[in-house]
Amino acid sequence: MQKNELVNLTIEDLSYQAMGVAHHEGLTIFVNNALPGEVVEAKILKVKKTFAFAKIEKLVKASPYRITVKLNQWVQTGLASLAHLQYDQQLVFKRQQVVNLLHKAGMDQIKVDETLASPEQTGYRNKAQVPVRKIKGQLEIGFFRRRSHDLVPLTNFFTTDPEIDRVLISVRDILRKYRVPAYDEIHNRGQVRYLDVRRSKATGEIMVILVCRQQKFPQLDQVTKDISKLAHVKSVILNYNPDKTNVILGKRDFVLAGQDHIMDKIGDLNFKISPQSFFQINSRQTPRLYQLAIDKADLHPDDVVIDAYAGIGTIGLSVAKHVKAVRGMETIKPAVDDANYNARLNGIENAKYVVGKAEEIMPQWAKAGLKTDVIFVDPPRKGLTPEFIQAAVKTGPKEIVYISCNPATQVRDLQEFQELGYEFDEISPVDMFPQTPHVESVTVLERTEK
Ligand code: SAH
């Protein structure tokens, strides 16, 4: 098989990255935007030893679940690469990802629930991070084409709160008005790299972060003034990121106008959010995710609870009033400061958060003889480490509630817990990211009585 060759393919499956999967001449072929059951004439883009990439040249037979997407760019970019699949089938796809991973791990007996649908399927994101680049002489915002850094200009970000889209466009126009140079990543020149905008659906407060290559530039004062005049903008921040890097945010933030944070709510609780703090992006689905995790946990008033990978303490503070004590850890210091502040703000006196890596703090706590009853973990995509898992088990919890944004590492870690005397019998997928292939899942491990 060669590049540019045309082949007829029947799509058998959908990969975890939302690509159609077919087989041809002993190779696995990943076809952009193709759906299971479809027959396509595909053009080969790239050939490797055991697999190849292709794109649809002609859709010979369409899936009954394919839907017409208003803007092709949503599917072409990483913004919403599943938008062409009917929503109920997106939920089926997400559940199937978990089923497949369990099957591979030899754990077919585990029950996988139906995926909990998101209350909003578009416009659900409370935050957008969009690249700024110069295209045909003009500063544009948009999204990168999948697996590339080619900016596709956009003004409707589809999965983002439409109020945020409006702010993004206004800020783009302000940058154009004052002729602020867009970032040029090839030469590491220019100025504005990304716009990062957050908006609370509960309070309406908006934070605008300009991710810039330099701390100061001639137009900055005028730009700041205009942005701070936009309705509901409570915080304007410059994030300083001078390096030639793919990482979006640099380490340092400077307040240009207003506050250094915005306020949001989850359920009855108020939360302060700083620029570098993680906050769940699907505001309406988050309380449902947490409630599911809390309902599955068997919490008692004298329980000692750990909130690991805590962010700004949203999970721990949601359970604090029902238990004796909450302790948590998180690597980002401003997030930990937010978590402790949020505890006080909500009149919670039995929760305390510390800065550090979970895999280092947990062994220290275990060594110091800490006994726990329930541990909540909510790690990033790479999951837990063996050090963390061993230390967590040493503190003797009756339950470990595992919230994951990557079922592949979750299943790996669950096997490790099983070897250390913990059992689980079901996993609940939750859709936090409609129109994308991302799967969130919750499971509860219980200590087997010895
Ligand atoms: N539980 C929170 C945050 C989950 S996101 C919520 O629901 O909002 C995962 C968090 O883990 C992020 O805030 C990230 O900064 C933090 N993190 C990443 N690596 C970590 C590590 N090794 N130890 C502790 N926290 C870590």
Image (spheres, rainbow, N blue to C red):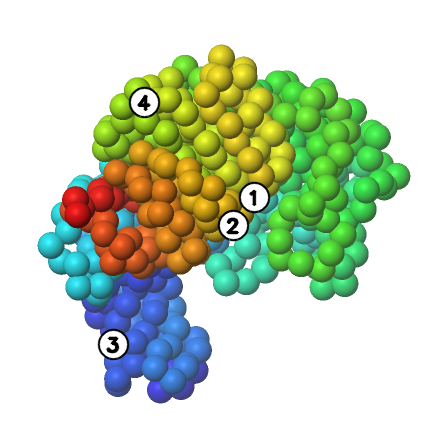
Q: Can residue 199 be seen in this view?
A: no
Q: Which of marks 3 and 4 is in front?
A: 4
Could you tell whether 209 is left or right of 115 in the image? right
Most foreground residue, 163 or 56: 163
Q: Nearer the viewer, mark 1 or mark 3?
A: 1
Which residue lies under the disc numbered 4?
302
Callout 1: 10 Å neighbours few (<14), some, many (20+)? some
Q: Does mark 1 have its CB less than 8 Å from ligand 1?
A: yes
Most foreground residue, 309 or 166: 309
Distance from Cα at disc 3 to Cα at disc 4: 56 Å
Distance from Cα at disc 2 to Cα at disc 3: 45 Å
User: Label 1 amino acid?
Assistant: Gly
Relative to 246, say whether 376 is above or below.
above
Which residue lies under the disc numbered 2?
360
Identify the residue at the far left of this view: 109
Q: Can residue 115 be seen in this view?
A: yes
User: Label 3 amino acid?
Assistant: His
User: Residue 15: x, y in percent?
Assistant: 31, 62
Identify the residue at the far top of this view: 347
The residue tagged with tag 1: helix, strand or loop? loop
User: Residue 145: x, y in percent?
Assistant: 52, 57
Mark 2 or mark 3, which has the lower sequence index? 3
Which residue lies under the disc numbered 1?
356
Q: Which of marks 2 and 3 is in front?
A: 2
